[in-house]
Image (spheres, rainbow, N blue to C red):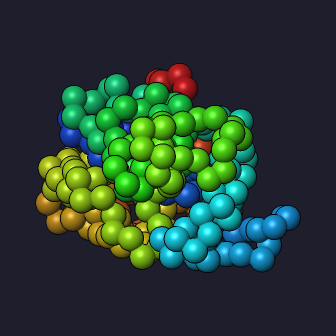
């Protein structure tokens, strides 16, 4: 049974000039990205809250990097799904666009997204703990664990936001500005409970934007959405693309 797409939504997507999109783990899950709650090998003894912290890295950088090396190996062969491709296509269709993602797996870039902010960083980037310089490193596995800065020899860390760390100010400011100025705000594959990201659709709605939610279940954001489409992100966006006449 095909999902019924409201004609008013299709019209709104065709006419939108300023679009912001917020994505979460539900988009990545359909590409096979695990939630990393640890169900195999060494990682059964640890939870992300025990490893994804500055304290854990200070205590045992080798252990933390072994975990991230394992995660990178799981993510490396995965491909974008229709939701990633729909969002990348939408970026090309509207004059003003920003993707705000909570995901760190890099699949949006792999699908072709360019205008985006990563609220939680990127697992394929490393940051020098001394100089603060950031660079991409997609080698799998990394040849040296823990890796060190080629310039100064200091430890490198994953360029991601750990528990207890603030979100990047520039990313958060860009996301808030997009929420305040867009005329259409899409929320795809996120439960709407993790703040400050969960506040963005509320900000968009309060500034007059139409809000579209795509999620398998009702969330705290459902009641404020102009349209709430229940289903997996890839399946719903595939139907939206069909209605818009797009090939993904």
Q: Is residue 104 above or below residue 207?
A: above
Residue 79 locus on image (x, y percent)? 65, 35
**If the image is split into quadrants, where does the C terminus sit?**
top right
Residue 46 locus on image (x, y percent)? 71, 75
* Residue 164 visible, this orientation: yes
* Residue 187 visible, this orientation: no
Q: Nearer the viewer, residue 47 or 244?
A: 47
Q: Is residue 35 above or below residue 56?
A: above
Q: Nearer the viewer, residue 194 or 209?
A: 194
Q: How many marks can you see? A: 0
Residue 112 locus on image (x, y percent)? 46, 28
**Residue in view at x 34 percent, y 25 percent:** 92
Residue 83 locus on image (x, y percent)? 53, 41
Which image quarter: residue 59? bottom right
Q: Is residue 28 above or below residue 10?
A: below
Report the residue that reaches farthest toward the front.
Answer: 152
**Residue in view at x 42 percent, y 38 percent:** 151
Q: Nearer the viewer, residue 45 or 198?
A: 45
**Residue in view at x 48 percent, y 46 percent:** 153
Q: Nearer the viewer, residue 129 or 233?
A: 129
244 left or right, relative to 144: left
Which image quarter: residue 25? bottom right
64 left or right, relative to 173: right
């Amino acid at each position: 049974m095909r999902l019924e797409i409201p004609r008013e939504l299709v019209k709104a997507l065709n006419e939108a000039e300023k679009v912001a999109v917020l994505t979460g783990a539900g988009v990545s899950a359909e590409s096979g990205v695990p939630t990393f709650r640890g169900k195999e090998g060494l990682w059964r003894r640890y939870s992300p809250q025990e490893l994804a912290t500055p304290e854990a890295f200070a205590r045992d950088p080798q252990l933390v990097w072994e975990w991230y090396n394992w995660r990178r190996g799981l993510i490396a062969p995965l491909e974008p799904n229709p939701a990633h491709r729909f969002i990348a296509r939408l970026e090309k269709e509207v004059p003003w666009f920003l993707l705000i993602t909570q995901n760190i797996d890099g699949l949006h870039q792999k699908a072709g997204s360019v205008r985006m902010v990563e609220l939680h960083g990127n697992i394929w980037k490393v940051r020098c703990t001394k100089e603060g310089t950031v660079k991409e490193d997609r080698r799998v596995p990394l040849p040296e664990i823990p890796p060190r800065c080629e310039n100064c020899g200091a430890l490198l860390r994953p360029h991601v936001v750990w528990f207890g760390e603030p979100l990047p100010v520039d990313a958060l400011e860009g996301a808030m500005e997009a929420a305040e100025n867009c005329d259409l705000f899409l929320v795809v594959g996120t439960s709407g409970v993790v703040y400050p990201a969960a506040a963005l659709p509320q900000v968009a709605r309060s500034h007059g934007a139409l809000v579209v939610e795509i999620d398998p279940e009702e969330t705290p954001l459902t009641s404020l959405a102009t349209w709430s489409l229940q289903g997996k992100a890839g399946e719903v966006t595939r139907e939206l693309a069909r209605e818009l006449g797009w090939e993904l």
